[in-house]
Image (cartoon, helix red, strand yellow):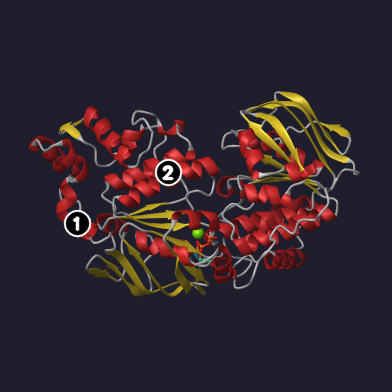
C-alpha cells in the first residue's frame, strides 16, 4: 500500500498552501486520493442503504480456542448494527479482525468493491474503518481540537500548527455531531461520554464511514449514555454505519436497526430490531428463557440482624462527611451519577484511599483501616471497577490470580495446589468462566470473563462484607444471572453487600436499600418499594 509515502507535514502543508477552503481541509484532506470510500450523493439518495462492508466465513483460532468459526456479518450506510452475545462469544475478536488488529485464519472481508483476506490497522483506517475501544485512546493533556487533529495537524507553515483552523475544524465536526463541547477544553476535564464523543469526532476527521464501538457505554450512567447516543445518531444521519457492541439490551433496542447474535464464535441470528422483543434476543444469546434474573427474595432482609459496618462522618478524597450502615445479610446499593463519589467511598472504606476524618465500626468494634491488607484482615473485600489496573495480575494465569487473596491462609504460605486448582475449577464452572484451562493467562480472557475471574477469587475468600464497584460491568445476561444467584446465596448465609452500580435495574432488582450519592455526599436513602428508577434519578439529578 502506498500509504504514507510522502511525509505528512509536507502533504498537509501543501493543502494549506493550496488555499482551499476550511471545509475542504477538514473533510477532504490529501489522503483522499488514497481511495478512502466516501458516501456518494447517489448512495445517500438511495435511502442510505449502500452496503459498506461484508464479512464472509471469518474464522480465527487462538491455539485450541476457536474464537470465530465461519462468521458472516454486514453493515449498511446509515445504520446501527448491534453485535450481541455472551462473554467469550467472539464479538471483540470479530471487530479486531475488522480493525486490522487480528489477521483471520480464513474468510473474506469486502469493503465497498474491494475484497481482502485480512487487514492491517493502517489499511482499515484508510478504508474508513475507525474503532473506538472501551479504553480511552485520547491524549488527556491535549485539547479536544488537538486530539481530533492529532497526527494530521493543520499547518499554517510547514512547521507551525494553525491553531485557528484546528479549533474551527474541530468545532465544525462537533457541530455535525450536535455535541456541546468546547474544542479548547483539555480532554482530561471531559466526562467519559464526552471523551467518547471526541473519539467519534476524530473518526469523522479521519473520514471514517464505519464506526466500530466495543462496549463504549459500559462505565456510563443513563445521562452519559444518552449524550453518547445523540452523537451516534447524528453520525448515522450523515451516512456513517455503526457497529455497536453492548451487553445492555435496552441500549440495543433504543439505538440499533439490526442486531446480530454470536454464540461460541458462530452466528445465531440477525434480526431487524423492530421485529423482535427483548425475550427473543435473550433466548438467542443465552440459549434458554430467562425471566426474573435477580432472584429477589420477597421480604426486606436485615432488619433484625446486627450491623456489620458502620461509617460515621467519613471524609476522604472525593467524599465528605458520609455516614451509613450495612446490616448482616443485607444488600445496600450506592447510586449516583458518574463522579458522585461512589467509588471513592468504597475505596475509603477499604483503605485504598486514606480517610482524613471519620470512624468505622466493623462487627460492632471500632476499627482503623489504613490499607487494603488491613481491610482484608478485618473481613472485607473490594471488587474494583477497573479490572485491568486494580483487579487482576494480567500476565498471570487464572489459577494464580485465584489463589492470591488467600495465600496467607496456607501454612507458611506454601500453596496446596491440588485443592486450590480444584476450587478454581469449581468456581469457573459455577460462574461459567470461559477458559481453555485454569492455567490460561488472564490477559487472553474476554473482558467479561476477566470480570468473572475477579469475582471468583473473592467469593472463595468468603469475607463478611463484599464491597462491589460496578460488579457486572461487561458481563452478559446469562452470567449476570449466575452472579446474582451467587450474591443471593451469600446474603442468605449472612454475608453483606455494599455495591455501587450504574445499572438501575440491577440496583432495583437486588438491593434492600439504596443510598443516592451526589458531589461526594449521601443525599437520600430509599428502602424496599421506594427504590424506583424515578426516585433514584430524581435524587441523583
Ligand atoms: N489473544 C488471545 N489469546 C487467546 N485466546 C483469546 C485471545 N483473544 C481472545 N481469546 C479467546 O477468544 C474467545 C472470544 O473472545 P472475545 O474477546 O472475542 O469475546 P467477547 O465476545 O468479546 O466477550 P466479552 O463480552 O466478554 O467481551 C474467548 O474464549 C477468549 O478467551
Ligand atoms: Mg469483548
Indicate which disc, 1 or 2, sits on the residue closer to the N terminus.
1
Mark 1 and mark 2 in contact? Answer it, CB < 8 Å: no
**Residue 37 appears anywhere in the view:** no
Residue drawn at x 68%, y 40% is 334
Q: Which label belongs to residue 40?
A: 1
Task: Tell me if 257 is positioned left or right of 505 in this view.
Answer: left
Q: Nearer the viewer, residue 66 or 7?
A: 66
Q: Which label belongs to residue 102?
A: none
Query: In the picture shown, does residue 186 fall above or below 133?
Result: above
Tag 2: Cα neighbours inside 10 Å, few (<14), some, or many (≥20)? many
- Image x and y of residue 70, in percent: 42, 76
Q: What residue occupies the far left of the structure in this picture?
A: 18
* Element marked by disc 1: loop
- Image x and y of residue 477, in percent: 61, 61
Q: Which residue is mark 2?
A: 196
**Residue 381 appears anywhere in the view:** yes
- Image x and y of residue 201, in percent: 33, 43
Query: In the picture shown, does residue 194 fall above or below 6?
Result: above
Count of residue discs: 2
The answer for how far apart the CA atoms under marks 1 and 2 are is 27 Å
* Element marked by disc 2: helix
Amino acid at each position: 500500500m502506498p500509504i504514507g509515502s510522502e511525509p505528512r507535514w509536507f502533504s498537509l502543508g501543501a493543502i494549506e498552501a493550496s488555499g482551499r477552503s476550511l471545509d475542504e481541509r477538514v473533510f477532504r484532506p490529501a489522503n483522499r486520493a488514497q481511495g478512502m470510500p466516501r458516501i456518494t450523493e447517489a448512495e445517500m439518495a438511495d435511502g442510505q442503504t449502500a452496503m459498506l462492508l461484508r464479512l464472509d466465513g471469518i474464522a480465527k483460532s487462538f491455539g485450541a480456542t476457536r474464537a470465530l468459526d465461519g462468521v458472516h456479518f454486514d453493515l449498511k450506510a446509515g445504520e446501527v448494527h448491534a453485535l450481541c452475545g455472551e462473554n467469550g462469544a467472539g464479538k471483540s475478536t470479530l471487530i479486531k479482525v475488522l480493525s486490522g488488529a487480528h489477521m483471520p485464519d480464513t474468510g473474506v472481508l469486502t469493503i465497498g468493491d474491494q475484497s481482502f483476506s485480512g487487514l492491517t490497522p493502517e489499511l482499515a483506517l484508510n478504508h474508513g474503518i475507525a474503532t473506538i475501544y472501551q479504553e480511552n485512546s485520547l491524549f488527556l493533556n491535549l485539547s479536544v481540537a488537538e486530539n481530533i487533529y492529532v497526527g494530521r495537524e493543520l499547518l499554517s507553515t510547514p512547521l507551525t500548527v494553525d491553531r485557528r483552523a484546528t479549533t474551527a475544524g474541530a468545532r465544525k465536526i462537533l457541530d455535525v455531531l450536535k455535541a456541546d463541547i468546547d474544542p479548547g477544553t483539555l480532554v482530561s476535564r471531559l466526562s467519559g461520554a464526552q471523551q467518547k464523543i471526541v473519539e467519534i469526532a476524530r473518526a469523522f476527521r479521519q473520514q471514517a464511514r464505519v464506526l466500530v464501538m466495543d462496549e463504549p457505554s459500559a462505565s456510563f450512567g443513563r445521562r452519559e449514555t444518552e449524550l453518547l447516543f445523540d452523537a451516534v445518531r447524528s453520525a448515522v444521519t450523515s451516512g456513517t454505519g455503526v457497529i455497536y457492541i453492548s451487553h445492555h439490551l435496552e441500549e440495543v433496542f433504543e439505538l440499533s436497526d439490526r442486531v446480530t447474535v454470536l454464540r461460541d464464535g458462530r452466528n445465531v441470528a440477525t434480526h431487524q430490531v423492530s421485529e423482535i422483543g427483548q425475550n427473543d434476543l435473550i433466548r438467542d444469546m443465552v440459549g434458554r428463557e430467562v425471566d426474573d434474573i435477580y432472584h429477589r427474595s420477597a421480604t426486606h432482609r436485615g432488619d433484625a440482624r446486627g450491623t456489620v459496618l458502620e461509617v460515621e462522618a467519613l471524609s476522604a478524597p472525593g467524599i465528605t462527611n458520609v455516614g451509613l450502615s450495612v446490616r448482616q445479610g443485607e444488600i445496600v446499593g450506592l447510586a449516583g451519577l458518574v463522579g458522585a463519589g461512589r467509588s471513592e467511598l468504597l475505596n475509603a472504606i477499604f483503605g485504598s484511599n486514606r480517610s482524613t476524618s471519620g470512624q468505622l465500626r466493623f462487627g460492632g468494634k471500632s476499627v482503623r483501616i489504613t490499607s487494603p491488607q488491613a481491610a482484608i484482615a478485618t473481613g472485607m473485600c473490594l471488587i474494583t471497577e477497573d479490572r485491568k489496573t486494580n483487579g487482576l495480575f494480567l500476565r498471570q494465569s487464572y489459577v494464580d490470580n485465584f489463589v492470591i487473596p488467600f495465600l496467607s491462609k496456607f501454612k507458611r504460605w506454601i500453596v496446596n495446589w491440588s485443592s486450590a486448582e480444584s476450587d478454581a475449577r469449581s468456581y469457573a464452572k459455577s460462574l461459567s468462566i470461559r477458559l481453555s484451562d485454569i492455567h490460561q493467562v488472564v490477559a487472553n480472557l474476554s473482558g467479561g470473563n476477566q470480570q468473572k475471574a475477579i469475582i471468583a477469587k473473592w467469593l472463595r475468600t468468603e469475607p463478611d462484607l463484599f464491597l462491589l464497584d460496578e460488579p457486572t460491568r461487561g458481563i452478559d445476561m446469562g452470567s449476570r444471572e449466575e452472579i446474582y444467584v451467587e450474591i443471593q446465596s451469600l446474603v442468605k448465609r449472612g454475608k453483606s453487600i455494599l455495591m455501587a452500580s450504574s445499572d438501575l435495574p440491577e440496583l432495583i432488582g437486588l438491593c434492600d436499600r439504596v443510598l443516592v450519592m451526589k458531589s461526594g455526599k449521601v443525599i437520600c436513602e430509599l428502602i424496599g418499594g421506594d427504590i424506583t428508577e424515578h426516585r433514584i434519578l430524581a435524587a441523583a439529578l
